[in-house]
Image (cartoon, rainbow, N blue to C red):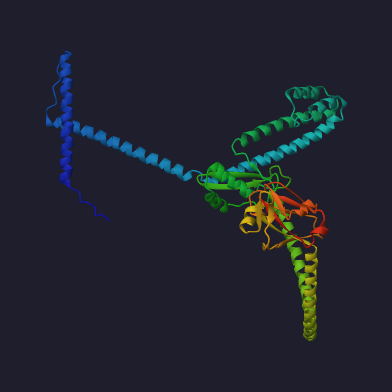
Amino acid sequence: MQKDKKYNYNDYNNSKQKIYQNFRRKILNLEENKTQDEVELGQGAVSKISSESELEETYQAKGGSFWKIFFYVVFFTVISTSVIVYYLYNKPQAEDRFNKYKSLVEEINNLDRNLSQKKKELTKIYRELAKNPNLSAKLKQSKGRNLVLTAEEEEFFKKKQKTEKDIPSKENLKKVLDKNEEIKKLRAEISKMKQKINPPVIMKKDLSHEKIAFDFLTKEIGLSPKEAEKKISNVNIFDYNYDGLFVYNFYEDNFFGTFVTKGRADKTPNEVKEIAKKAYNKKLADLRYTKRKLTKEKEVLESDLKIKEEVVLNLEKEKEKIIEEKKNVTESFSQKTAELEQKLKKKEELITRLNSLNFKALSCDQAESLGYISSGFFSGLKIEEGAKINYRSHVNLLEKKEFFLTPKNFKLKEINNIYILPENYLDNNDLKVSWDQKSCKITILNKENLKEKSILILAE
């Protein structure tokens, strides 16, 4: 902390002397100019102030004016500060404004309920008046106008009220006019009050209170999702989705408030909560009953389990004996089964081989490079004598009448031509070949001549 500086009276006197000298110089210049002007105008010269005492008196007079102005400035500064402080202290806080906002909405809802009640009363009066044949036609014309009379209808009912001789109808006509006026006033008042609040958002089954509040804060106020979630976590959110409830949102001075009203729903928020609470309590009661029931069943099952465990233990002992016996039988059976399966497999292979057409698919270039084929100008393509071709692929003629090959089988991109070697199988119409660029189809025509035979299928 800095120490207070000592007051220097010499500095004060020096500064005072400088102020005095400047002031004196200005007064002398002013008086000199004034005297010169008066001489030039012919009004006579006024003697100048020259004595030191006169200057001091003038200086003192000016000093008195300075302190007076200083006093007024301080006075008005204090008053202004007090007013500002008072205003800020008594300015309604955002939360107070939110509570007033809620009260205004509640007041509008009360007026709406009052309006609905008056409409019901007016409807009842209309039913009574409809019994009068002189008025029923006019009432039918007025139907669908939300029960409020037009200027023409109001004039008609006023005249009718004066001339109507039936006392009950006359009284009902007066009630209609009175209720009509009350409804108009209520509507005007509600409309005026609704201008002071933001329109509510209507809740739906797929649009929750939390979602509505989040959209309001992010889309209308411009908060980030994280800021919006933090604001929502600090307020009461209605936990149930119910069609027709009204959601009001309020945001001022970084304060967020939200609440739910009945709106167009057939239940109030409290009634919805009560229904949900009853459903929850019923579900809880059902769960407790189920728990007790399951506990009893568990006890019975545990008792049965104990008995059955003893039975299982005895059965396990018998099982071990049976397993040992089975093992001996199984070993013998497995050996015989393996022998039988081997015989069956050999038999099936033999049957398949006896009833199969063996083939090998190659490209012409590949077959020629392997020495499988040769070509002559007159003889054409033919299988080389002594060529050791391994016909790995086969077709079971008992199962298939045709089979297909693709360019991939020949290690080609497309098929332009197909050759079958030996060619005599084609010449004798034992099989038929057709192809396009994407596939080759070989149809078996005479399977008896093709059994146990081998062919070389070439493509280019």
**Viewed as shown, does residue 153 lie left or right of 74?**
right
Residue found at the far left of this picture: 51
Query: Within the image, what quadrant is residue 83 found in?
Result: top left
Query: Within the image, what quadrant is residue 119 found in?
Result: top right
**Viewed as shown, does residue 322 lie left or right of 14?**
right
Query: Within the image, what quadrant is residue 189 found in?
Result: top right
Residue under the image location 27 percent in, 56 percent down: 1
Vertical relation: 165 (above or below) 124: above
- Is residue 226 at least partly visible in the picture? yes
Q: Position of residue 184 (x, y in %)?
A: 70, 31
Nearest the viewer among 273 and 360 is: 360
- Is residue 97 at least partly visible in the picture? no
Q: Position of residue 317 (x, y in %)?
A: 78, 86
Q: Position of residue 171 (x, y in %)?
A: 81, 30
Vertical relation: 248 (above or below) 445: above
Nearest the viewer among 220 and 328 is: 328
Residue found at the far front of this picture: 378
Q: Position of residue 448 (x, y in %)?
A: 83, 59
Vertical relation: 181 (above or below) 349: above
Vertical relation: 334 (above or below) 409: below
**Viewed as shown, does residue 186 lie left or right of 175?**
left
Total tally of numbered discs in the picture? 0
Nearest the viewer among 356 and 314 is: 356
Residue under the image location 20 percent in, 34 percent down: 60
